[in-house]
Image: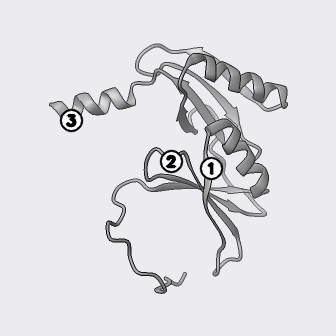
Amino acid sequence: MSVRQDRQPPEAPDVGWTHIALPVKEIARSVRFYEEFAAMRVVHERIDQDTGSHVVWLSDGTRPFVLVLIESERIDHVLGGVYCHLGVACSSRAQVDDLCARARSLGMRVLGPQDSGPPVGYWAYITDPDGHNLELSYGQEVGATLRSRAKG
């Protein structure tokens, strides 16, 4: 794969986690799913010069992290099963319930919701059109855990 040199590097380059990339069969369908169920929006779109693949970056705008969707004829592995998933925090239990009800009404596979108590909280899985699991949660203690670790 060639590295393109046609752009200047950003003044403040990204450091740390920046993205996760998933293969999808129909990019428009997957974009609609993540817009509706993860409150993400397209922030970048292109046809990859090397592969010819349609590529979309989605973000919720809260941090410099994107979900990269790459259109592919074949998906060899999915984020599925019991543990593999992308996790998105919701603003309330009601939002988790509402999104699960919406997914069920559209015939999507939904696991939960269930309350696992601290630090996991109230959560459910919705399976995207390609079989990748999206976890919706409320009350997970990721932020609180990081803040307490930073203090000492």
Query: SS of the residue at dot 2?
Result: loop
User: Which mark sits nearer the N-terminus, 3 or 2?
Assistant: 2
* Residue at image mark 3: 150
Q: Quadrant of the N terminus?
A: bottom right
Crowding at dot 2, Cα within 10 Å, few <14 / some 14-19 / many 20+, comes out as few
Q: Is residue 93 left or right of residue 10?
A: right
Q: Amino acid at mark 3?
A: Ala
Q: Quadrant of the C terminus?
A: top left
* Residue at image mark 1: 41
Q: Nearer the viewer, residue 92 or 15?
A: 92
Q: Residue 116: where, in percent of width, then height? A: 51, 15
**Distance of mark 1 from mark 3, alpha carbons?**
31 Å
Query: SS of the residue at dot 3?
Result: helix
Q: Amino acid at mark 1?
A: Arg
Nearest to viewer (mark 3 / mark 2): 2
Contact between labelled residues 2 and 1, with CB atoms less than 8 Å apart: yes
- Residue in the picture at 71% in, 76% down: 52
* Residue at image mark 2: 61
- Residue in the picture at 36% in, 62% down: 14
Nearest to viewer (mark 1 / mark 3): 1
User: Which mark sits nearer the N-terminus, 1 or 2?
Assistant: 1
User: Which mark sits nearer the N-terminus, 1 or 3?
Assistant: 1
**Distance of mark 3 from mark 2, alpha carbons?**
24 Å
Crowding at dot 1, Cα within 10 Å, few <14 / some 14-19 / many 20+, comes out as some
> Residue lying farthest left?
152
Q: Residue 83: where, in percent of width, then height? A: 56, 34
**Distance of mark 1 from mark 2, alpha carbons?**
8 Å
- Residue in the picture at 77% in, 27% down: 102
Q: Is residue 74 left or right of residue 118?
A: right
Q: Is residue 27 left or right of residue 86?
A: right
Query: SS of the residue at dot 1?
Result: strand
Specify how the rendered protein is coloured.
one colour
